[in-house]
Image (tube, rainbow, N blue to C red):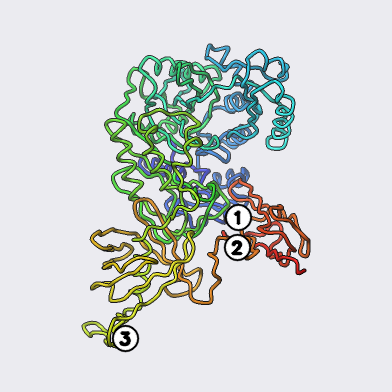
């Protein structure tokens, strides 16, 4: 076994690999970009080395391995994990690449070649055709419509075009070819029969260098949005023992066909109504969702990877693999479902991660979530003796999770795993998009409950209660309880949320009993008790616990914004004083002409100049973050009176990019 292993990755996967290295007594080497200098994976490794060129800096990684005496490099997933050239460079440098041989990576990285290889090995593939050997128009007629066009070199759903008739085919082929050439540098295409309402089921395989290949059961990954997985589980609620064995055997043959070693995943598309399954692709690395397999098999997949890479045979046979219970994983993303799932960011002001379940996380309180990398923050994984128990435990764990300071998708995840179709196991890859209106509150639906407004006002009000020296009562005339002759006076707090600005009135002392009056409502008796980062607020007859944090926006003191979290949801409530602009910060509505950034990121393109006349809805800028581009349009017609940014400039969420003013008559 190795003495020192370099982990060529970041965030939660780097930490997860480091955890196994520590358990095995292996020295861990972390690498980091400048943006990650204080990241958790850096702090928890035995040694850390800066990468001048970031995580794709192959020269920097090899130099770090040499400088630290590493004998092997574990690539995790993403970045260089499926880069055959990097695997070869590791071998040339005398390092073990913890992954499959470069030839296997290349064979499975080309979709056309991969299909031909596994088909020759007897693995079912979706009927279709591929360039250069086939005429795609003829192949489409042969397999029938609807058909799906895919780039041969692509991944993640990019460049895929659905064609429902022969009349659509010429333009669809031209569009897919343009995308493939631009995104992957390879315009080669294939076309396949489109499987309606498919399920996405993958098989985990593990192989050693002595011909041993086993599968560790399946994972159901059908809950997706725009071809990106959200929730995964093991085993699949669809498969019976016979189908599981048949798909597992097909996956093993797919791995054998390319001389595979290490951990890999063979992905299948499955027709839910018939159970027919077809090879889709093979991922030649550890998968994001590997924890669900670990929880139901009791195996550490990273340890198996390391042992195989060190030349050991697999420690078990296929007959010794056991699946126990059920596990479900949910991916926590820095994104805002209410704003079309746009990426978010910010500083983690407070962090609550749930006990009693597995959490693979790269988060740390005080850490900054920027726009440099993928928006996935953590994974919450729950095991139960059966599927219903696992879903219940996952829901409870998500309810106990709070990431204050960064908007996330946690509330959306809870709504998704509680949806009747998900609970029933009636899954397919289109489920999320079909039911999105049920999973994300629509426009006009208040997003901030009354008790949250009251709790935020109490937090602000309580900060004005003076405390004297130890054992000495505060001057009663300084206590802001609203006392005066006659009826006690109200203190007004103008709190801005995504719903707008609300005036909340408070009188009395929060700790001993106060009253809160919400707009249009009668006063309610309230009480506040708190210690550290948690609050217990009694609103009427109901007491609720909240995580709480303050954001000063870079200034000193307690800050202008109160963040509250409970039941997996989080709210930011900003205090506004009379004289502040009436519109909430993120509105960017036609009335004010302000053009704001919908997400933290970088200005990619500026499409209009200062002084230029524009029409309502005209594209003005493109902001890019986390590999996603968003076009920002003019909120109203007029003249670009101010242009505050340039191409290449980093911007925060809701930052004013430009101002459009109506032309004077």
Q: Which residue is mark 2?
A: 655
Mark drawn on residue 433: none
Mark 3, Cα crowd under 10 Å, few <14 / some 14-19 / many 20+, is few
Looking at the picture, does residue 398 appear above or below residue 645? above
Dot 1 or dot 3: first in sequence order is 3
Left or right: 389 with respect to 499? left
- Report how far apart the C-alphas of labels 2 and 3 lie in the structure: 38 Å
Looking at the picture, does residue 126 appear above or below residue 46? above
| Circle 1 or circle 3, nearest the eye | 3
Contact between marks 2 and 1 (CB within 8 A): the answer is no
* SS at mark 3 in the image: helix
- Report how far apart the C-alphas of labels 2 and 1 lie in the structure: 10 Å
- Report how far apart the C-alphas of labels 1 and 3 lie in the structure: 45 Å
Quarter of the rendering containing residue 328: top left
Left or right: 546 with respect to 102? left
Dot 2 or dot 3: first in sequence order is 3
- Residue 530 or 215: which is nearer the viewer? 530
| Circle 2 or circle 1, nearest the eye | 2
Q: Which residue is mark 1?
A: 601
The residue positioned 66% from the left and 50% from the top of the image is 631
Contact between marks 2 and 3 (CB within 8 A): the answer is no
């Amino acid at each position: 076994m190795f003495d020192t292993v370099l982990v060529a990755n970041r965030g939660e996967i780097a930490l997860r690999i480091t955890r196994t290295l520590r358990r095995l007594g292996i020295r861990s080497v972390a690498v980091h970009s400048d943006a990650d200098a204080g990241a958790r994976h850096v702090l928890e490794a035995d040694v850390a080395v800066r990468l001048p060129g970031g995580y794709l800096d192959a020269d920097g990684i090899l130099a770090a391995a040499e400088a630290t005496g590493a004998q092997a490099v574990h690539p995790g997933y993403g970045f260089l994990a499926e880069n055959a050239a990097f695997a070869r460079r590791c071998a040339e440098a005398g390092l073990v690449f913890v992954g499959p041989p470069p030839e296997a990576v290349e064979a499975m990285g080309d979709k056309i070649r991969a299909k031909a290889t596994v088909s020759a090995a007897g693995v079912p593939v979706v009927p279709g055709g591929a360039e250069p050997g086939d005429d795609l128009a003829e192949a489409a007629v042969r397999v029938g419509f609807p058909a799906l066009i895919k780039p041969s070199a692509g991944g993640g759903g990019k460049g895929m075009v659905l064609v429902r008739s022969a009349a659509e085919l010429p333009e669809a082929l031209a569009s897919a070819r343009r995308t493939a050439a631009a995104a992957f540098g390879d315009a080669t295409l294939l076309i396949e029969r489109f499987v309606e309402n498919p399920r996405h089921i993958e098989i985990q395989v593990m192989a050693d260098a002595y011909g041993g290949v086993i599968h560790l059961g399946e994972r159901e990954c059908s809950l997706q949005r725009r071809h990106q997985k959200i929730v995964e589980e093991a085993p699949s609620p669809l498969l019976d023992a016979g189908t599981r064995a048949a798909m597992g055997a097909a996956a093993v043959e797919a791995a054998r066909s390319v001389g595979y070693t290490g951990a890999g995943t063979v992905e299948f598309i499955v027709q839910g109504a018939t159970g027919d399954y077809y090879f889709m692709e093979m991922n030649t690395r550890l998968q994001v969702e590997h924890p669900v397999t670990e929880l139901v098999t009791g195996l550490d997949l990273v340890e198996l990877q390391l042992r195989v890479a060190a030349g050991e045979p697999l420690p078990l046979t296929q007959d010794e693999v056991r699946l126990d219970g059920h596990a479900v994983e949910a991916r926590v993303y820095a994104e805002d479902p209410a704003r079309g799932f746009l990426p978010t960011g910010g500083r983690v002001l407070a962090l609550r991660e749930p006990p009693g379940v597995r959490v693979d996380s790269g988060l740390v309180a005080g850490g900054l979530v920027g726009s440099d990398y993928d928006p996935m923050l953590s994974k919450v994984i729950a095991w139960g003796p059966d599927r219903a128990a696992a879903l219940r435990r996952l829901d409870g764990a998500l309810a106990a999770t709070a990431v204050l300071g960064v908007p996330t998708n946690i509330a959306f995840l809870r709504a998704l795993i509680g949806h009747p179709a998900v609970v029933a196991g009636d899954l397919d890859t289109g489920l999320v998009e079909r039911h999105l209106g049920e999973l994300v509150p629509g426009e006009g639906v208040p997003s901030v409950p009354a008790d949250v407004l009251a709790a935020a006002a109490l937090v602000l009000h309580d900060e004005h209660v003076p405390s004297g020296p130890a054992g000495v009562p505060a001057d009663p005339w300084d206590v802001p309880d609203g006392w005066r002759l006659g009826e006690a006076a109200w203190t007004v707090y103008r709190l801005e949320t995504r719903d707008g600005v609300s005036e909340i009135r408070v009188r009395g002392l929060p700790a001993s009993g106060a009253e809160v009056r919400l707009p249009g409502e009668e006063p309610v008796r309230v009480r506040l008790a708190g210690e550290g980062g948690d609050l217990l607020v009694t609103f009427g007859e109901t007491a609720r616990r909240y995580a709480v944090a303050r954001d000063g926006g870079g200034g000193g003191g307690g800050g202008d914004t109160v963040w509250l979290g409970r039941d997996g949801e989080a709210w930011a409530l900003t205090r506004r004083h009379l004289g502040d602009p009436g519109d909430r910060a993120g509105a960017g509505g036609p009335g004010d002409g302000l053009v704001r950034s919908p997400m933290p990121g970088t200005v990619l393109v500026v499409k209009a100049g200062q002084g230029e006349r524009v029409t309502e809805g005209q594209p003005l800028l493109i902001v890019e973050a986390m590999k996603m581009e968003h076009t920002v349009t003019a909120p109203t017609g007029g003249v670009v009176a101010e242009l505050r940014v340039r191409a290449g400039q980093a911007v925060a969420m809701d930052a004013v990019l430009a101002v459009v003013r109506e032309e004077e008559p």
